[in-house]
Image: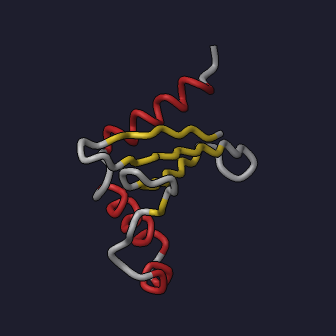
Amino acid sequence: MRHEKIFKREDGKQFQIIVEINIDTFRNELPTWRVSCYTREPKQKKWRFLPHTLGDYQIRSLPMIDREKHLYNNLLRFVTPEEILLVKIELWQKIKPT
């Protein structure tokens, strides 16, 4: 399941946070979350990936735990943990049992 929300900044920049949850009871009993973010400059139509502090080769050469930490810390350079949590809560509200 996927949910996305757009946040606008005072300078006109927009950030689109996408949260996906995968509930796979065959492999794992706990749900796995995936968070990604895109940015759009003022008066632009195209969404772009967030820029990284490391190159692709450097990111891929990291161990998986360090890679996930780096990607999450890079994400926090642009959006706040509260915004990510808000999108996760909205997704949970869509899928929660009644």
Above or below residue 97? Residue 11 is: below
Residue 77 percent coordinates (x, y)? 28, 58
Rendered residue at 58%/45% (across/down): 20
Which residue is nearer to you in this view: 49 or 94?
A: 49
Residue 2 on image: x %, y %: 61, 41
Q: Is residue 67 above or below residue 76?
A: below
Describe residue 48's horizontal placement relative to residue 24 as left or right: left
Which residue reaches farthest front?
43
In the image, taking residue 84 as reference, residue 24 lies left or right, namely: right
Compared with 51, 5 (above or below) is above
Look at the image and tell me in which quarter the N terminus lies.
Answer: top right
Please name the residue shown 40% across and 33% down the image. 86
Q: Can you give x and y, in whole percent of width and height, for residue 6 in the image?
A: 44, 40
Quadrant hosting residue 95: top right
Query: Which colour assignment does the render follow?
Result: secondary structure
Which residue is located at x 38 percent, y 59 percent?
72
Q: Which residue ends up furthest to the top in the rendered image?
A: 98
Q: In the image, what residue occupies the spot 49% across and 72% down?
A: 64
Task: From the top left corner, tell me how far across and down residue 28 is, in percent.
Answer: 65, 50
Question: In this figure, what is the number of numbered marks?
Answer: 0
Q: Quadrant of the C terminus?
A: top right
View extreme (left): residue: 10
